[in-house]
Amino acid sequence: SQKIEQNSEALNIQEGKTATLTCNYTNYSPAYLQWYRQDPGRGPVFLLLIRENEKEKRKERLKVTFDTTLKQSLFHITASQPADSATYLCALDRSSNTGKLIFGQGTTLQVKP
Amino acid sequence: GAVVSQHPSWVICKSGTSVKIECRSLDFQATTMFWYRQFPKQSLMLMATSNEGSKATYEQGVEKDKFLINHASLTLSTLTVTSAHPEDSSFYICSASGVLGGEETQYFGPGTRLLVL
């Protein structure tokens, strides 16, 4: 069955450093992959979408890579700030562009001042 | 950007009662909305797809008679948890498809926390 895995352990880093989060998937060939941010008690907020033919995508301090051979996406936050502390979710569309998303369990990032 | 709202934001009810949760797309029309459920420290799990003007489609293991979905207009979908029980206590989140920067993506509501006593 389709499976998405994120590092369930919390990631603690110092302010100003780069945070790198990993998303691995199996039994799947997605056309694109999405990253969301979720704060406690809130719904997910869309951050970035990367397509299978894109190796890398950037948005301000965010960078996402997508390696379809390794079946892995990396999510980077450069010059991290305490306000970046949240849970980050990766998600795949279950089949081509249906909007039916499968989410990873999320990785909680804590940026310390 | 597109905004999706939910009401109520939280609800406490007695076991056996029914609870209705509303999901609205505030500045765009959504022919399709999705309902997810999230238990503590777990990921979001898709429950059903709500289609305007037609029946909802449910994911495997989700009881359609227990979780009634109505998508009466292009901006409103409702989820009714019928005869709620403590195991239904969860965080319910809806989403709607929209276009941002030329790309279709999902906009999520703020979620509704349900506690069944």
Image: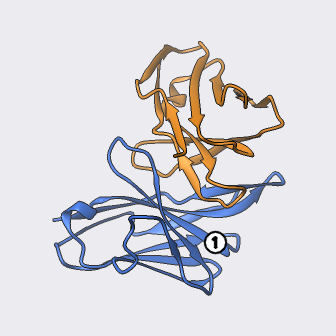
Chain colours: A orange, B blue
- Within the image, what quadrant is residue A69 found in? top right
Between B47 and A21, the one lying in front of the other is: B47
Q: Amino acid at mark 1?
A: Thr
* Residue B3 place in picture, x, y as percent: 62, 62
Residue depicted at 58% across the width and 36% down the height: A26
**Is residue B5 placed above or below A107 in the rendered structure?**
below
Question: Can the viewer see residue B99 in this picture?
Answer: yes
**Is residue B108 placed above or below A59 in the rendered structure?**
below
Between A22 and B73, the one lying in front of the other is: A22
Relative to B16, B11 lies left or right:
right
Label 1, residues with CA under 10 Å away: few <14, some 14-19, many ≥20? many
Between A105 and B101, the one lying in front of the other is: A105
The total of numbered circles placed on residues is: 1
Between B33 and A17, the one lying in front of the other is: B33
Residue depicted at 57% across the width and 25% down the height: A22
* Chain ID of residue with mark 1: B
* Residue B45 place in picture, x, y as percent: 45, 54
Quarter holding the C terminus of chain B is bottom left
Provide the secondary structure element on which disc 1 rests.
strand
Residue depicted at 56% across the width and 23% down the height: A81
Question: Can the viewer see residue A113 in this picture?
Answer: no
Relative to B106, B90 lies left or right:
left
Quarter holding the N terminus of chain B is bottom right
Residue depicted at 32% across the width and 46% down the height: B40
* Residue B103 place in picture, x, y as percent: 79, 53
Relative to A38, B33 lies left or right:
right
* Residue B32 place in picture, x, y as percent: 64, 72
Reading the image, the residue beneath label 1 is: B32
